Amino acid sequence: MAGTLRDREKAPRPSKQSSRDPALPQTRQDIMNGTSSKKRRPNGPVRVKTAGESGRRGIHPLHFFKITWKSSSYLSRAVNVLWPIVPAAIAVYYSLEDHHVLKFILAYIAMIPCANLIGFAGQELARKMPHVLGILAETTIASIVEIILFMILLVGPNPQYEVIRAAILGSILANMLLCLGLCFFASGIRRETSTFDGAISEIGTGLLLMAGLGLAIPTIFQNSISVTDFELTPQQIDDKVVSLSHAVAVLLLVSYCVYIWFQMRTHHGIYDAIFEHDEKRDADGHKDQAKAKLTLTECIIALAISVALVSIIAIALVNEIPFIVEEQGISDPFMGLILVPLVEKAAEHLTAIDEAWDNQINFALAHCIGATIQTAMLNAPLVVIVAWGTGRPMDLSFEIFDVAMLILAIITVGNFLRDQKSDYFEGFLCVIIYIAIAVAAFFFPNLPHAAEGTSGSGEH
């Protein structure tokens, strides 16, 4: 009996931390320190992931501005220095009638911090979701800038079909070559080689090749039909190309939905394991856990503000494009293939480069390839379907030069991804290829009807 009492006295007493019921909510200090348990039950109907828990509710203006200013990385924070350009661009656009070059430059620069805010708000929102859903939500939110620009180019008084078509392929090329190349280069600077999972690269390149061929079908179809050989008028050929583009757009949308089902439902475990592995090897993971985060309400407010600003800036930017093309001699291919995609994809590029720098190469690939797939299989078909519904003859008949560059770029990137390894040299080569395409687009001449700003379908 004495031995039993003595044993009880020597036994360690349970600490307050271990005796706490894991189902009870943890303190704010635990959350801020990144030590919150995965067993914590949410107070509301939406389960917020531990990595995205802010420890606050509602909106706190001081915290909101402080967190958004710091942004997600040093690159994004440097972009925030451009915020004074936003009111200046809006004021100049509505106050000056001429000075088209100045208005275009200011609107172009102002789009970058606005797009960066969309990207940051999407990233903060994605942290509160499961991995696969978060990547999908972040990529979709970052595409808002692209969708807004496409729609404004489409529904304006002078629809700029050539710029839209070039911007679709330019967005794909910017993600595949420029963004992916910079990710490989950034990762290769800090480590000799970076390894990534084949599930992302193989499925991604397969989808890109399929989407690229799908987008090329109307172009090949139109250039295979001769007016004299088939005894058709140009208008009849144009009508067939538009109808074919509608069918291709629907098929690409269906394929994208099946891909989302594959990724989110039937094979989500593969992607979850890949992204969890990337989180463990995150070089700055401890800093991400410790830094302050936006609440769900603040994420929604940031998205609303940034989308409104992007819409205003996009209107100013698009309205100045015809003047830049006509007066400054900038070709439509260069405007659509290079200039427009660079500004609309700024947020995604900064996020992916930061992830590659931190050794989260699978996350970076998911952003690069995922955004490319979304442009090819969602955004581009969406523009065609909206044009179809509004009676506009928008089609997917691209220039032979653009389609050739697209297919060759997909094949080149696929070869770089085949060995599931990357280094700075491969990244450098991807960027060099993109620069070469940009130079070719700069010297590519405008079509005779391009100056009128009403380039219709089938006029190539």
Image (cartoon, rainbow, N blue to C red):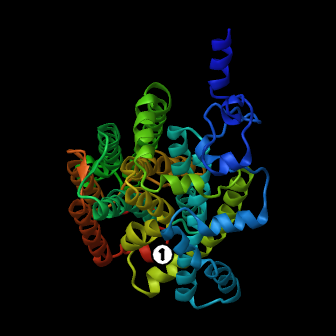
Percent position of residue 279, x then y:
45, 45
Q: SS at mark 1? A: helix
Q: In the displayed orientation, state which residue is furthest to the front.
A: 2
Camera sees residue 245: no
Residue beneath the point at 52% across and 68% down: 76
Q: Is residue 431 left or right of residue 396?
A: left
Q: Position of residue 415 (x, y in %)?
A: 20, 49
Percent of width and height locating residue 261: 48, 30
Considering depth in this image, is 366 or 240 the residue closer to the camera? 366
Q: Can see residue 148?
A: yes
- Label 1 is placed on what type of residue? Glu
Report which residue position mark 1 lands on. Answer: 452
* Image-based side of 149 in relation to 191, left or right: right
Residue at the spot 29% in from the left edge and 39% down from the top edge: 198
Q: Tell me what residue is drawn at x 41 percent, y 61 percent.
A: 353
Q: Position of residue 99 (x, y in %)?
A: 57, 91
Please state, as top left, top right, bottom left or bottom right, where the C terminus lies in the image.
Answer: bottom left
Quadrant of res 244? top left
Nearer to the camera, 280 or 372: 280
Give above or below for 288 relative to 329: above
Which residue corresponds to the image point at 64% horizontal and 30% vertical from the top-left? 39
- Above or below 92: residue 159: above
